[in-house]
Image: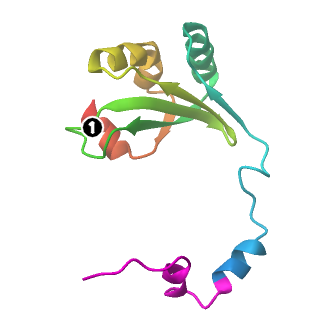
């Protein structure tokens, strides 16, 4: 039988208390200290604006948010795009396959433009789910 560790006990297995010191004294930046511009794209006008930005960009990053990692079973719930550091867009998709495909359609021209460099997170999963 297993017992639930007391609060703080689990980290004690991995540290002698130095982790907390390192984290507290870290000079690394985080989302609270880095200026950023993250946008939720939820209207047709905002989609058109994002597509225009992507058309002008020579390269962009792309990622999908899904219900799982098995490309044959996962459903897409959203897409994210970025063209430079600390600026990104998130496009939620409807919860039906047909709705998700319709939401992706305005981006087809971008995805099919071979002159653009696409940097994709989990590309192996993305390409096999399309």
Which residue appears at 31% of the width and 44% of the height?
68
The residue closer to the viewer here, 2 or 94, is 2
Taken as a whole, is the magenta stretch helix, strand or loop?
Answer: loop
Q: Position of residue 45 (x, y in %)?
A: 60, 8
Which residue appears at 39% of the width and 20% of the height?
94
The number of callouts visible is 1
Q: Residue 16: within the magenta?
A: yes
Which residue appears at 28% of the width and 15% of the height?
98
Tell me: 116 left or right of 86.
left
Q: Quadrant of residue 4?
A: bottom left
Q: Position of residue 81 (x, y in %)?
A: 55, 32
- Seen as rendered, the residue at the extreme left is 72
Q: Is residue 5 above or below residue 60?
A: below
The residue closer to the viewer here, 51 or 2, is 2
Q: Residue 28: within the magenta?
A: no
Q: Quadrant of residue 66?
A: top left
Q: Position of residue 118 (x, y in %)?
A: 48, 36
Q: Quadrant of residue 38?
A: top right
- Seen as rendered, the residue at the extreme top is 45
Q: Is residue 68 above or below residue 10?
A: above
- Neighbour class for label 1 at 10 Å: few (<14), some, many (≥20)? some
Q: Is residue 113 above or below residue 18?
A: above
- The part of the chain drawn in magenta is 1-18
Reading the image, the residue beneath label 1 is 74
Q: Position of residue 23 (x, y in %)?
A: 70, 73
Tell me: 129 left or right of 77.
left
| Label 1 element class | loop
Image quadrant where one finds the N terminus: bottom left
Image quadrant where one finds the C terminus: top left
Which residue appears at 63% of the width and 14% of the height?
49
- Seen as rendered, the residue at the extreme bottom is 16
């Amino acid at each position: 039988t297993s017992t639930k560790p007391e609060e703080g006990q689990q980290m004690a297995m991995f540290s002698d208390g130095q982790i907390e010191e390192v984290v507290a004294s870290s000079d690394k930046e985080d989302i609270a200290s880095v200026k950023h511009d993250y946008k939720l794209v939820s209207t047709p006008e905002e989609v058109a604006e994002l597509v225009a930005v992507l058309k002008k960009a020579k390269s962009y990053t792309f990622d999908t948010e899904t219900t799982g990692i098995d490309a044959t079973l996962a459903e897409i719930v959203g897409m994210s795009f970025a063209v430079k550091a600390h600026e990104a867009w998130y496009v939620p998709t409807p919860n039906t396959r047909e709705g998700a495909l319709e939401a992706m359609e305005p981006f087809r021209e971008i995805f099919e433009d071979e002159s653009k460099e696409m940097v994709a997170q989990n590309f192996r999963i993305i390409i096999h789910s399309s």
